[in-house]
Image (cartoon, coloured by chain):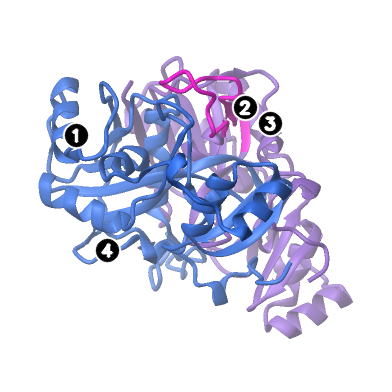
Chain colours: A purple, B blue
């Protein structure tokens, strides 16, 4: 079946305390897009974080000694480094001026997802939502369709970044082919597809990165429903990861 | 603009020596899908490889001593291991029964991309195209639109596999925002998006993995044209990769 990815623009800036439900409802109305059963609402992390008040005024951040030391080494703002450390469970590596951490959610990404783009000025920074699955679930309760909250991550081995799912609700993020057969009745080699990440990537194509289109509606994809679905399913456990080592 | 991803099924098996142009033309006709300017034709590696005769009868493979040793360690077919070694430039790691290599093209993936799914029987294996960019270019010459050839790769840190681009023609695989501004006129933090991989992922959603739909048409995405575009652009150089080490 044909899949469509519909961009949904948001006018104006999202401020802490605003209702995400109201923002998205208005954006859908303004775009003339009506929700249909089976639609997947894809929302960029940035507006979720902003609405949830995950914007930090850097003037209020007091860097730890560890942050000061790392900031000096990397020649970065120590207050930003402090936030990155606070948002992390573990520093995975520091190399070439880049900090890769495991966030408190378990995601492996640059800067613990702390970001300064699409903010009015650089005196503040945006953190990932505290619990993006919970944020997704609230949106699901509001709109009654599957929700994916996305962020843009770099990845090893390949240049360029791509959107992945950091929060999901109502959709199983991984489609399993385990036990399924190919067209010749043989067991499939490829067994698990990270469809939530693929949907996040598809949505990015409609969103772009310059801001203004933080929402996309994905229609026509026959996803597997999951009342208890979680983005944690997409996170590989440290002990199972081939490329993670505590010492570097 | 709304993006659509149209699945295009192929009836019957693709055999070595068949014309890929004829197969795709027929598949488009059978699906009632006409090509439009600006469309991106996404083709699964498997049918490209099959048509190009990259199917190897395992009975013809004589395993090297190295392959025999590795096969014993991993309890796998030594002839398959031999093919994986032949297709590789370097073994990146062998762990938990998995072989991750750098392919001759530079891709980091499991088993050098050598695969046995969607084959009539397990006495043979399919290799990646010798030069997927060249394969893409030939299709571009035939159909006059942008081409992406995809394969399904695993990735560090995240569970589940996702489709990526292994061959491109006529489309710049990375969209650069370097020097561009966000909605507040600030320099963007996210600078390069691997749109070819995102398109490959979007196409996978329409293709699925059970076989029968190895083609998807992506319509409505305003890609950047690139007469000399190459999938190599997506390959991070070993020296620039944070997670690659020759010794493990």
- Residue holding disc 3: A230
Residue at figure coordinates x 69%, y 77% from the top left: A77
Which residue corresponds to mark 4? B229
In space, the residues marked 2 and 3 are separated at their CA atoms by 7 Å
Q: Is residue A174 magenta?
A: yes
Q: Tell me which secondary structure the magenta stretch mostly adopts.
A: loop
Decide which of tag 4 and tag 1 comes sooner along the chain.
Answer: 1
Q: Which residue is mark 1?
A: B24
The residues colored magenta run A167-192
Q: Secondary structure at mark 3?
A: loop
Image-quadrant location for residue B227: bottom left
Q: Position of residue B152 (x, y in %)?
A: 47, 42
Q: Closest to the observer: A180 or B53?
A: B53
Q: Is residue A206 visible?
A: no
From this view, report whether residue A95 is shown above or below residue B94.
Answer: below
Query: What's the CA distance linking mark 1 and mark 3?
Result: 38 Å
Q: Are marks 4 and 1 in contact (CB under 8 Å)?
A: no
């Amino acid at each position: 079946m044909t899949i469509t990815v519909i961009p949904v623009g948001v006018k104006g800036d999202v401020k802490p305390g605003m209702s995400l439900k109201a923002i998205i409802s208005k954006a859908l109305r303004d775009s003339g897009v009506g929700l249909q059963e089976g639609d997947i609402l894809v929302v960029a992390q940035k507006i979720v974080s902003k609405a949830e008040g995950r914007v930090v005024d850097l003037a209020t951040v007091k860097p730890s000694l560890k942050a000061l030391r790392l900031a000096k080494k990397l020649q970065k703002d120590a207050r930003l480094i402090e936030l990155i450390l606070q948002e992390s469970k573990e520093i995975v590596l520091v190399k070439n001026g880049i900090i890769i951490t495991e966030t408190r959610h378990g995601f492996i990404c640059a800067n613990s997802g702390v970001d300064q783009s699409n903010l009015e000025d650089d005196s503040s920074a945006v953190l990932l939502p505290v619990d993006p699955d919970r944020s997704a679930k609230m949106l699901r309760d509001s709109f009654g369709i599957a929700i994916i909250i996305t962020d843009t991550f770099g990845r090893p081995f390949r240049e360029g970044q791509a959107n992945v799912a950091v929060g999901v609700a109502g959709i199983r993020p991984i489609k399993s082919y385990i036990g399924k057969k190919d067209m010749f009745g043989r067991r499939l080699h490829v067994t698990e597809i990270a469809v939530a990440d693929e949907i996040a990537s598809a949505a990015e194509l409609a969103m772009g990165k310059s801001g203004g289109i933080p929402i996309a509606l994905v229609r026509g994809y026959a996803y597997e429903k999951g009342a208890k679905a979680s983005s944690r399913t997409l996170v590989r456990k440290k002990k199972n990861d081939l490329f993670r080592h505590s010492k570097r």
